[in-house]
Image (spheres, coloured by chain):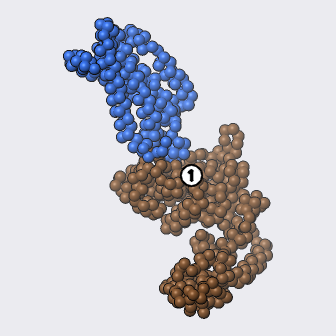
């Protein structure tokens, strides 16, 4: 324990910098992936025929090994092999893949009676989506987002193999020097970050879906 | 006024939900569509606000063909209540009620004030305003559903089995709320139910639909009970028709007998001396009947005491002078003394009547109706629901004795 603390203090500047990069690398793709998944998920729920292909496509994207994607993207995007953009784009793809289904299912899960009451009151299609379906889908989308956030963080650590400098470097350092301390420190940092991401998403859901606490079960 | 003009709805698979349906729902009245499941009553209702479009025929709302109106504009002028309210789970009670005013572009403060006023009108306390639907009982949710439908002050309301998911006691309360609101507001209401009792209780006129989506009979409640058009309607309207029809027959002038009443709090000894046949009627200071006192059962030892509420037999129902024969008969049959208590409209004691006296009144009314039927037999009925009505059948139309 003492060694761990000592290691952290002596590498504090570097670890802090890595932590900030890690947060960015996980958070930005999360937002971008959600932004892409909303229209795609909406399409999958609105046009029933498009649900199977869209969800299958999302599933297929998710099965691409991350390392392969990290190495393929520079060729596709024309970026340098060490560019963090590669990691950001790859994680956006995974987030998108995870969330398309959550968005589609969340929007479709809204009670049929509620929807028909809303359209009987004179909601237009867009008002129905923004005013009823989307707010009611928040809990389902939020759950998907929590899974995606944790998955993103662990994938960020994999990206250190291709040389981006973030908290994953602690694992590389530890294994190359054959000491356990940086590895344990990295582990602790990732767990703390994962908990923080989860907390932020849960707080956001609480704000966006205050009614949720009133619904039993 | 809502007019159906030979409306047919045929689904893609060839199923016909509604077939050649014509009907006129008058303004300011409750028209009930009733029938077994699969008779197309909900489809019929949903064609009014274009949730469903008919295959052929027209639906006119105040002489305008609804097919020519834009659905969402049409719907904002039509209140809509469904089973379990169809409330938005993510909006508070107040948020639910102010939905339509906000859609209509009213400012939030006005919409909120209106919502609070409606909450009161449907009998909900202001405390529930900030709660979510899941925190309310079924009956409360349904009240919110009614308030929400009224919020845009639409001239027309569509109600699709709104009270069928709550228990009978709550259902009766909700029906009272609707009758009271309708008395104040006079909306044009089309109400769908599968419950013939609810139809009779609420409807100014009732359309009975049969499976296959055709109209079996369109009539006012008393006529539906006394003259079902065919075996299907007779079977659907059910048993006790004759007795239930008395609920629409004005009691008229019953021979009221005076009663030597006893004041609550007065001496028991005097009460025993006043009672006839062993029963004395106890009233309060305002002459409102409270219950019967079995004078024979008062022990001698207690005779020094006063008449107290605990000694009263409360079994009897009360009937009002302006009420129906059904109420009067029920008052007589339920009275422990055998003497039915009739009160003035303000609740003061008017007199008593026996079951045999009420039956005499029922007999003479029936005889009168039979004579009239013979007289009418030569003529054609004037139109749906308007044949064979006599003055004393008109209780329903004036709103007395509906409950």
Which residue, given by chain and number where applicable, does mark 1 sit on? B83
State the hue of chain A: blue
Q: Can residue B368 be seen in this view?
A: no
The quarter of the rendered structure image containing the N terminus of chain A is top left
Location of residue B24 in the rendering, given as x and y in whole percent from the top left corner: 62, 60
The image shows a total of numbered marks equal to 1
Location of residue A129 in the rendering, given as x and y in whole percent from the top left corner: 46, 39
Location of residue B372 in the rendering, given as x and y in whole percent from the top left corner: 75, 77
Q: In which quarter of the image is residue B332?
A: bottom right
Q: Which of A203 and A102 is in front in this view?
A: A203
Chain letter, brown in picture: B
Please determine whether, in this image, residue A13 is positioned above or below residue B181.
above
Q: In which quarter of the image is residue A19?
A: top left
- Report the residue at 57% width, 87% height from top: B301
Please determine whether, in this image, residue B216 is positioned above or below residue A154.
below
- Report the residue at 60% width, 55% height from top: B164
Mark 1 falls within which chain? B
Location of residue B46 in the rendering, given as x and y in whole percent from the top left corner: 59, 49
Q: Which residue lies furthest to the front in this view?
A: B301
| Neighbours of disc 1 within 10 Å: few (<14), some (14-19), many (20+) | some
- Report the residue at 41% width, 25% height from top: A148
- Report the residue at 52% width, 87% height from top: B305
Q: Nearer the viewer, residue B87 or A127?
A: B87
């Amino acid at each position: 324990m003492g060694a761990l603390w000592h290691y952290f203090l002596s590498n504090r500047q570097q670890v802090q910098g890595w932590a900030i990069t890690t947060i960015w690398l996980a958070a930005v793709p999360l937002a971008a992936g959600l932004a892409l998944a909303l229209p795609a998920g909406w399409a999958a729920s609105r046009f029933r025929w498009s649900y199977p292909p869209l969800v299958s496509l999302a599933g297929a994207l998710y099965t691409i090994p991350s390392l392969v994607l990290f190495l393929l993207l520079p060729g596709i995007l024309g970026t340098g092999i060490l560019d963090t953009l590669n990691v950001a784009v790859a994680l956006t793809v995974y987030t998108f893949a995870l969330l398309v289904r959550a968005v589609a299912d969340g929007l479709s899960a809204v009670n049929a009676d509620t929807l028909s009451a809303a359209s009987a009151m004179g909601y237009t299609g867009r008002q129905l989506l923004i005013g009823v379906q989307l707010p009611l889908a928040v809990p389902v989308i939020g759950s998907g987002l929590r899974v995606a956030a944790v998955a993103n963080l662990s994938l960020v650590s994999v990206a250190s193999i291709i040389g981006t400098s973030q908290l994953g470097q602690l694992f590389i350092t530890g294994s190359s020097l054959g000491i356990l301390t940086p590895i344990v420190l990295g582990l602790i940092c990732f767990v703390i970050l994962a908990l923080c991401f989860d907390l932020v998403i849960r707080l956001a859901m609480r704000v966006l879906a205050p009614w949720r606490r009133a619904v039993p079960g | 006024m809502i007019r159906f003009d030979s409306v047919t709805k045929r689904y893609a698979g060839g199923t016909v939900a509604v077939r050649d349906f014509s009907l006129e729902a008058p303004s300011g009245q409750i028209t009930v569509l009733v029938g077994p499941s699969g008779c197309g009553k909900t489809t019929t209702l949903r064609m009014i606000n274009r949730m469903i479009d008919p295959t052929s025929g027209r639906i006119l709302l105040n002489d305008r063909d609804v097919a020519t109106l834009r659905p969402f504009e049409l719907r904002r002028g039509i209140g809509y209540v469904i089973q379990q309210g169809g409330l938005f789970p993510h909006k508070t009670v107040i948020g639910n009620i102010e939905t339509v005013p906000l859609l209509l572009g009213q400012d939030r403060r006005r919409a909120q004030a209106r919502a609070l006023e409606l909450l009161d009108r449907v009998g909900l306390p202001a405390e529930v305003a900030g709660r979510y639907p899941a925190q309310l009982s079924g009956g409360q949710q349904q009240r919110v559903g009614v308030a929400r439908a009224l919020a845009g002050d639409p001239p027309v309301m569509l109600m699709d089995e709104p009270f069928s998911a709550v228990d009978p006691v709550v259902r009766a309360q909700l029906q009272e709320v609707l009758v009271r609101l309708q008395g104040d507001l006079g909306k044009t209401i089309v109400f769908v139910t599968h419950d013939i009792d609810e139809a009779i209780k609420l409807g100014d006129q009732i359309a009975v639909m049969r499976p296959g989506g055709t109209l079996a009979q369109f009539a006012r409640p008393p006529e539906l009970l006394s003259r079902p058009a065919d075996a299907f309607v007779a079977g659907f309207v059910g048993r006790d028709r004759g007795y239930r029809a008395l609920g629409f027959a004005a009691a008229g002038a019953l021979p009221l007998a005076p009663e030597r009443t006893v004041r609550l709090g007065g001496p028991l000894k005097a009460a025993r001396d006043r009672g006839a046949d062993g029963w004395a009627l106890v009233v309060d200071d305002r002459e409102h009947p409270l219950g019967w006192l079995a004078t024979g059962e008062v022990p001698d030892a207690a005779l020094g005491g006063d008449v107290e509420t605990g000694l009263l037999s409360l079994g009897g129902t009360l009937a009002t002078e302006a009420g129906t024969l059904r109420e009067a008969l029920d008052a007589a049959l339920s009275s422990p003394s055998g003497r039915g208590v009739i009160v003035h409209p303000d609740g003061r004691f008017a007199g008593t009547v026996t079951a045999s006296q009420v039956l005499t009144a029922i007999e003479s009314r029936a005889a009168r109706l039979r004579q009239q039927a013979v007289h009418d037999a030569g003529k054609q009925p004037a139109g749906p629901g308007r044949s064979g009505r006599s003055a004393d059948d008109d209780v329903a139309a004036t709103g007395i004795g509906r409950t």
